[in-house]
């Protein structure tokens, strides 16, 4: 057995062997079965007379206002810290603490880390070290292993480097277990494992002005130095819990969906699941297949569109085998999709290049203003939601349950979901929707959940309460020039970045897919790709100039933050509901995700060609 840390005699660099073994073979799953019932694969016709009139607008507003302030989440600290344990891997591989130096240190071993390694190593940057909290690669797909997990961007576009690996996903929407295996294949093929310290959480990242290095401290006692730090720690990494009175009293088994406890045999048990977001929509139908009784506690329903899952066809396999570049071309076509619903529908003819457009773009006989465009989008968005609501009535038999499952907010304001088995699940006699609208579950006791005076005794309670969005805890531990933390900067000044990738006062630090980071599409790995390319470009530029340090001009960062604010405000009516996307209605405009679409490139391209925004030190910079 190789030691956990050794020196490669050829390169003189440290090589690691810290990947942990899988904790148990019980941790396995397959994803979805294919639905054959044609009725479940089409949305009903638009109900007659559906217009987004004043009455409907008032309904949306009331739906939103009733929920304002209801979302109250807590971090998993103190007695809830146990919910963060890595249940998927054997204990960490023992190793010495590291106090040496590397050129580039990357936080995170998800698709972000994997793609960065691929790009960096190809560009000749090999002194790269990754720190990953989990015991293996995969990130999102390592942590989330609930039954039914699958991607909702079609896998032929979502999985990067398909040509390079020669891999073809088995389903249009591959199961999370297959995606995890794919990440492991990527890591093996490209030598990622040698570079990664698993079960290593970065606890502090501090800029040392004297040496022009970052000092990176971890929970394994490491104190490493690095010229560059890249934060690839994800956007949905830190799970959160809803704050519910008495939750610490529950005597049964409980866990969060991102740490699924496969040691608990759910067969025949009475199980409760709190939350009905994207995760629950995937997990509930699978849970219903095995548990005795299932109670689904819902505050706000998700929009449940048609999924139309299918296996990859033999014809596709044959075509792609003869078509070099097929996956790159498909990803590029996917990236051109500008509407969320079109993205999840993932039209095969368009993505395969058989047709140039999914539908003919509308021609207007006058120049349409941005405000008119938003209004038009809201109107067509309303029609989609009407069809989604009609689908609930067409499938769910109990009228009271159907009424509770209907969402009243703009499509896409909360993460849009799709599934062909979720709604029919509520027709099963052992599945019960407990409608806790609009304020959510308010009490948990020793035996289970209490709502409006009714107690629901449970053997197992599952929290499907989601994640912090866009503000992963690593950001809070970064201390830049003058001893100022990134958290403090953003709390006092608002989120300030240039392109989402740099923040003034934090030299040689790159934030991949963080707040304000555009350049992506509905496919998240696109943004990772764009940001990875940018980072490599910057490192090459610095190498060519002999520059040691890069920071960004404050005024350019201010202007970019203002741009993010403006594009967020301009499209805000499309996100007018209480959602994690808008910080439950509390986030300052422009402080979270980027809403400027292709405009990000209009900031990036001149920056890269003039280099004006950058402050280089050392060399010719
Ligand atoms: C259930 C679920 C389904 C999703 N489905 C899709 C989809 O279908 N399509 C899509 O485009 N996107 C989807 N996403 C978004 C998904 O997160 C991205 O697609 C992508 O996987 C993100 O990769 P990443 O490497 O940037 O982040 P992650 O996959 O989150 O990886 C970040 C890693 O950083 C590690 N980390 C964080 N902080 C530290 C620290 N301080 N020290 C050490 N390690 C740290 C974490 O442990 C994690 O492994 C989904 C997200 C979730 C939660």
Image (tube, grey):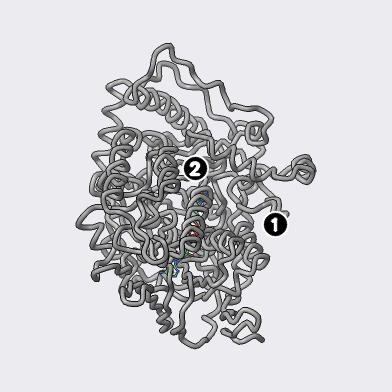
Across and down, in percent, residue 610 comes to 41, 47
Specify whether tag 2 is near ligand 1 (CB below 8 Å): yes
Crowding at mark 1 (Cα within 10 Å: few <14, some 14-19, many 20+)? few
Mark identifier at residue 522: 2
Q: Is residue 248 depicted above or below 522 in this figure?
A: below
Across and down, in percent, residue 497 comes to 33, 53
Q: Is residue 165 depicted above or below 584 in this figure?
A: below
Q: Nearer the viewer, residue 454 or 155?
A: 155
Residue on which the image places disc 1: 165
Name the quadrant containing residue 60.
top left
Specify whether tag 1 is near ligand 1 (CB below 8 Å): no
**For the point 39% across and 43% down, which residue is it?**
603
Across and down, in percent, residue 5 comes to 56, 84
Across and down, in percent, residue 106 comes to 47, 67
**In the visual, does 297 lie left or right of 439?**
right
Q: Is residue 507 depicted above or below 37 in this figure?
A: below
Residue sitting at the far front: 620
Q: Nearer the viewer, residue 505 or 359?
A: 505
In the structure shown, which secondary structural element does the residue marked by tag 2 occupy? loop
Mark 2 to mark 1 CA distance (whole Å)? 23 Å
Name the quadrant containing residue 3.
bottom right
- The number of discs equals 2
């Amino acid at each position: 057995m190789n030691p956990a840390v050794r020196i490669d005699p050829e390169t003189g660099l440290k090589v690691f062997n810290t990947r942990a073994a899988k904790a148990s073979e019980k941790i396995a799953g397959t994803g979805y079965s294919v639905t054959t019932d044609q009725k479940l694969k089409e949305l009903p016709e638009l109900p007659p007379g559906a217009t987004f009139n004043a009455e409907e607008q008032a309904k949306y507003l009331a739906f939103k206002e009733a929920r304002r302030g209801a979302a109250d989440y807590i971090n998993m600290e103190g007695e809830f810290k146990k919910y963060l344990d890595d249940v998927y891997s054997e204990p960490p591989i023992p190793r010495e603490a590291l106090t040496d130096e590397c050129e580039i240190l990357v936080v995170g071993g998800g698709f972000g880390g994997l793609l960065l390694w691929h790009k960096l190593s190809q560009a000749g940057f090999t002194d790269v070290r990754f720190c990953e909290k989990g015991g293996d690669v995969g990130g999102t797909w390592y942590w989330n292993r609930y039954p039914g997990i699958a991607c909702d961007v079609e896998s032929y576009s979502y999985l990067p480097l398909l040509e390079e690996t020669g891999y073809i996903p088995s389903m249009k929407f591959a199961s999370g277990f297959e995606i995890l295996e794919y990440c492991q294949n990527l890591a093996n093929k490209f030598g990622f494992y040698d570079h990664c310290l698993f079960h290593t959480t970065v606890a502090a990242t501090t800029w040392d002005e004297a040496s022009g290095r970052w000092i990176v401290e971890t929970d394994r006692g490491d104190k490493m130095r690095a010229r560059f730090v890249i934060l690839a720690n994800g956007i949905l990494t830190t799970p959160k819990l809803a704050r519910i009175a008495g939750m610490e009293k529950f005597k049964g088994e409980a866990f969060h969906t991102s740490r699924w406890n496969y040691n608990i045999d759910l067969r025949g048990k009475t199980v409760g699941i709190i939350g009905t977001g994207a995760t629950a929509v995937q997990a509930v139908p699978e849970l219903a297949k095995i548990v005795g009784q299932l109670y689904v506690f819902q505050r706000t329903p998700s929009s449940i569109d048609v999924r139309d899952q299918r296996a990859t066809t033999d014809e596709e396999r044959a075509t792609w085998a003869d078509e070099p570049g097929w996956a790159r071309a498909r990803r590029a076509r996917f990236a051109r999709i500008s509407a969320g619903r079109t993205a999840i529908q993932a039209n095969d003819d368009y993505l395969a290049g058989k047709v140039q457009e999914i539908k003919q773009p509308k021609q207007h006989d006058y120049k349409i203003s941005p405000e008119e465009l938003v209004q038009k989008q809201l109107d067509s968005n309303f029609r989609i939601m009407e069809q989604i609501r009609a689908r609930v009535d067409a499938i769910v038999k109990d009228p009271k349950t159907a009424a509770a499952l209907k969402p009243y907010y703009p499509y896409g304001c909360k993460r849009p979901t799709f599934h062909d088995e979720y709604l029919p699940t509520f027709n099963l006699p052992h599945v019960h929707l407990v409608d806790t609208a609009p304020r959510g579950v308010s009490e948990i006791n020793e035996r289970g959940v209490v709502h409006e005076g009714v107690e629901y005794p449970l053997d197992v309670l599952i929290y499907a309460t989601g994640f912090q969005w866009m503000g992963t805890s690593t950001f809070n531990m970064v201390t830049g020039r003058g001893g100022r933390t990134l958290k403090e900067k953003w709390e006092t000044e608002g989120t300030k970045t240039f392109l989402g990738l740099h923040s003034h006062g934090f030299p040689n630090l790159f934030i991949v897919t963080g707040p304000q980071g555009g350049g992506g599409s509905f496919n998240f790995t696109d943004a990772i790709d764009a940001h990875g390319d940018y980072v490599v470009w910057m490192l090459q530029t610095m190498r060519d100039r002999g520059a040691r340090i890069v920071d960004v001009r404050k005024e350019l960062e201010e202007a970019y933050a203002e741009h993010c604010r403006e594009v967020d405000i301009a499209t805000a009516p499309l996100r007018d509901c209480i959602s994690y996307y808008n910080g439950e209605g509390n986030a300052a405009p422009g402080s979270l995700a980027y809403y400027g679409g292709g405009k990000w490139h209009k900031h990036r391209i001149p920056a890269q060609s003039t280099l004006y925004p950058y402050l280089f030190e050392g060399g010719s910079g």
